[in-house]
Image (tube, grey):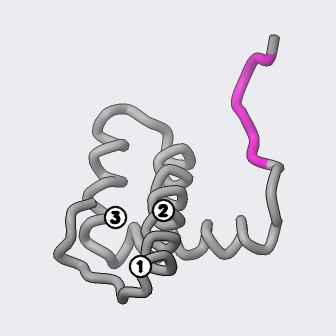
Amino acid sequence: AFRGKRKIAGGRKRVRDALYMAALNAVRRADPFKAFYERLRQAGKPAKLALIAVARKLLTVLNAMMRDRKPYLKAGPQ
């Protein structure tokens, strides 16, 4: 029944804001995340959607780091 663009409002705002800012930085500086973002943009996805997808991927990586108690390794598969 919903029409138009979706908005993110759920969850904890401070965590959402931190992930958004981290995703912005990752898109500019971290090669794997930058490549993922560019691939989504080339596929015709809107910039905001691609950025949120990077934030979700970043969250997944951070959760895996906490689970495995290992540092971030840039060379791993994304």
Q: Identify whether 48 is placed above or below 70.
A: above
State the SS at label 1: helix
State the SS at label 2: helix
Q: Which mark is residue 68?
A: 1
Residue at the limit of the structure toward the top, as seen here: 1
- Which of labels 2 and 3 is toward the front? 2
Q: Are marks 1 and 2 in contact (CB under 8 Å)?
A: no
Measuring from the top left, give residue 2's x and y in whole percent. Answer: 80, 17
Q: Residues within 10 Å of mark 1 (few under 14, many from 20)?
A: few
Give the residue number, with chain letter if any, for mark 2.
60
Residue at (30, 52) in percent of width and height: 38
Quadrant of residue 3 within the rendered picture:
top right
Secondary structure mostly taken by the magenta-highlighted segment of the chain: loop
State the SS at label 3: helix
Give the residue number, with chain letter if any, for mark 3.
33
Instruction: Decide if residue 60 is on the left or right side of residue 13.
Output: left
Quadrant of residue 4 within the rendered picture:
top right
- As shown in the figure, which amino acid type bears the numbered disc 1? Asp
For the magenta stretch, what is the residue range?
Answer: 2-8
Closer to the chain start, of discs 1 and 2, is: 2
Residue at the limit of the structure toward the left, as seen here: 75
Split into 4 quadrants, where in the image is the C terminus? Answer: bottom left
